[in-house]
Image (spheres, rainbow, N blue to C red):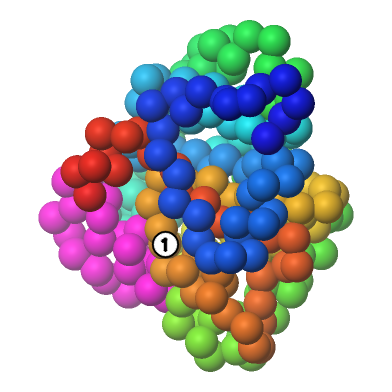
Amino acid sequence: MLAGLVPAPDHGMREEILGDRSRMIRQRGEHALIGISAGNSYFSQKNTIMLLQWAGQRFERTDVVYVDTHIDEMLIADGRSAQEAERSVKRTLKDLRRRLRRSLESVGDHAERFRVRSLSELQETPEYRAVRERTDRAFEEDAEFATACEDMVRAVVMNRPGDSVGLSAEHLRAGLNYVLAEAPLFADSPGVFSVPSSVLCYHVDTPITTFLSRRETGFRAAEGQAYVVVRPQELADAA
């Protein structure tokens, strides 16, 4: 917890820390990674503001990364034309960026601790590329990690609002591209962001976070990697 912020207000959020190692890393408060999924109705203006205010009180630095890659592939797999998919993605990302700007304004003096980037921007950095090489190799060589990634694809595909198409081979290919692009953030966000430790914060547990938070052999999360499920109190109570 940061100096001068004892106790920090919870901003209506509840944390679930995944494992003892994550608990120790979380207490350092060095860095948070907040992942934002474009088109996910959870990330309303209200929830995003609450999340950023919560992080601003607890971490020295926070990177907010919104996913803008491979979304069009999923829409094309749904049967949309490439032109329709492109227009839909542009509208979705424009709305998301506007909400992020407004949410960042809400953190006031803590805004300097935040950095907001798209995943496509992050992919251009040598730090991301180095970790991506390792996660891609692990997907090919570690069957259990590959299964976790494939389970993540199914979770992404089958839990989209309004899904009436079902799980097709095209969805699986598109979803796997999406998940493998995110995998470096799950496995080694300290390496991607050049920080001693990092807490990946998301509103639900996922097949990959469950797997990596418990894995002790084979391909594992980086030493300074932690995982926290954080969401509004009312949603946590309803779960």
Whether residue 168 is visible here, answered yes or no, is yes
Q: Quadrant of the N terminus?
A: top right
Q: Is 72 within the magenta? A: no
Q: Residues within 10 Å of mark 1 (few under 14, many from 20)?
A: some
Q: Is residue 114 above or below residue 192?
A: above
Q: Position of residue 216 (x, y in %)?
A: 63, 83
Residues 192 and 39: in front is 192
Toward the front, the furthest residue is 6
Measured along the vertical axis of the image, is residue 97 above or below residue 213? Answer: above
Q: Which residues are magenta?
A: 149-173
Give residue 34's position: percent from left, percent from top.
Answer: 57, 40
Say whether residue 161 is left or right of residue 172: left
Total marks placed: 1
- In percent of the image, x 39 and y 20: which residue is there? 45
Residue 99: x and y in percent read 47, 19
| Dominant secondary structure, magenta | helix
Residue 122 appears in view: no
Please tell me which residue is depicted at 24% across the width and 42% down the height of the picture: 237
Q: Secondary structure at mark 1?
A: loop
Residue at the spot 58% in from the left edge and 80% down from the top edge: 215
Q: Which residue is mark 1?
A: 206
For residue 152: magenta? yes
Task: Tell me if 3 is positioned left or right of 80 in this view.
Answer: right
Of 204 and 1, which appears nearest the observer?
1
Using residue 177 as the reference point, say whether residue 158 is left or right of it: left
Instruction: Answer with the quarter of the image where residue 153 lies.
Output: bottom left
Disc 1 residue type? Thr
Q: Where is residue 175? Give x, y as percent.
A: 42, 63
Q: Nearer the viewer, residue 115 or 79?
A: 115
- Above or below — where is 24 with respect to 144? above
Identity of the residue furthest to the left in this view: 164
Residue shown at the point (37%, 20%) measured from the top left: 46
